């Protein structure tokens, strides 16, 4: 019976570290979102994520973020996205933990003809343990929005808006 209580206590301890809260800030460099050469300026990205560890090396989470996608006249468009992301840690032992991942989700657009778009991302980065329950993350992410419609403003629809993002963040483990 003592073995069962020990296993139960270890399971509860593992479950206590299973949930995560991520806070990220960074910069985004969108590709040319409009034909004709109009480019977008670098913009800030702010995100928050909620997730759980599936195994010691894999994590599943929901990432909510906001960014500008076009900031040149006559378009000033922003996107808020909700993306389900899967992350795999390449080395879960040690202080530095490299990771890769991908996600797919939904984007809500402001100042475009259509108000929604499909969103996806792929990313890689490093995670550094600060304490048992706090990690610092550095992430490089390629973010895509599909079927963005600027037809009311500049006569373009079905555009794919790509951006490269560099992010720094904190992961809190509960």
Image (tube, helix red, strand yellow):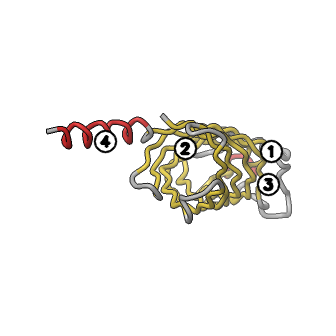
Name the residue rendered at 78%, 63% in the picture. Answer: 35
What is the secondary structure assignment of the residue under circle 4? helix
Task: Tell me the number on the disc at residue 102.
Answer: none
Within 10 angstroms of label 1, few (less than 14), some, or many (20 or more) residues? Answer: some
Quadrant where the image shows the N terminus: top left
Within 10 angstroms of label 4, few (less than 14), some, or many (20 or more) residues? Answer: few
Within 10 angstroms of label 3, few (less than 14), some, or many (20 or more) residues? Answer: many
**Residue 45's spot in the image, x, y percent?**
72, 42
Task: Indicate left or right for 5 with 94 as reference.
Answer: left
**Residue 134's spot in the image, x, y percent?**
61, 38
Q: Which residue is mark 2?
A: 63
Name the residue rendered at 71%, 51% in the picture. Answer: 138
**Residue 97's spot in the image, x, y percent?**
61, 58
Task: Give me the C-alpha separation between circle 2 and circle 3.
Answer: 19 Å
Front one among 59 and 27: 59
What is the secondary structure assignment of the residue under circle 1? strand
Q: Which residue is mark 1?
A: 43
Task: Give me the C-alpha separation between circle 4 and circle 2.
Answer: 27 Å
Comes first in the chain, label 4 or label 2:
4
Residue 16: quadrant of the picture:
top left
Task: Give me the C-alpha separation between circle 3 and circle 4.
Answer: 43 Å
Comes first in the chain, label 4 or label 1:
4
What is the secondary structure assignment of the residue under circle 2? strand
Within 10 angstroms of label 2, few (less than 14), some, or many (20 or more) residues? Answer: many
**Residue 164's spot in the image, x, y percent?**
73, 58
Comes first in the chain, label 3 or label 4:
4
Q: Which residue is mark 3?
A: 29
Comes first in the chain, label 3 or label 1:
3
């Amino acid at each position: 019976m003592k073995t069962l209580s020990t296993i139960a206590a270890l399971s509860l301890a593992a479950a206590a570290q299973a949930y995560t809260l991520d806070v990220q800030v960074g910069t985004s460099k969108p590709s040319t979102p409009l034909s004709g050469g109009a480019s977008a300026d670098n913009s800030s990205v702010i995100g928050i994520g909620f997730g759980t560890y599936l195994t010691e090396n894999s994590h599943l989470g929901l990432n909510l973020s906001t960014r500008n996608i076009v900031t040149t006249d006559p378009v000033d468009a922003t996107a808020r996205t909700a993306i389900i992301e899967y992350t795999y840690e390449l080395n879960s032992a040690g202080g530095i933990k490299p990771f890769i991942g991908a996600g797919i989700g939904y984007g809500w657009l402001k100042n475009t003809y259509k108000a929604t778009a499909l969103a996806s991302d792929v990313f890689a980065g490093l995670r550094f343990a600060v304490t048992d329950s706090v990690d610092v993350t550095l992430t490089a992410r390629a973010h895509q929005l599909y079927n963005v419609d600027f037809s009311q403003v500049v006569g373009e629809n079905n555009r794919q808006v790509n951006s490269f993002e560099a992010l720094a963040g904190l992961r809190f483990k509960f």
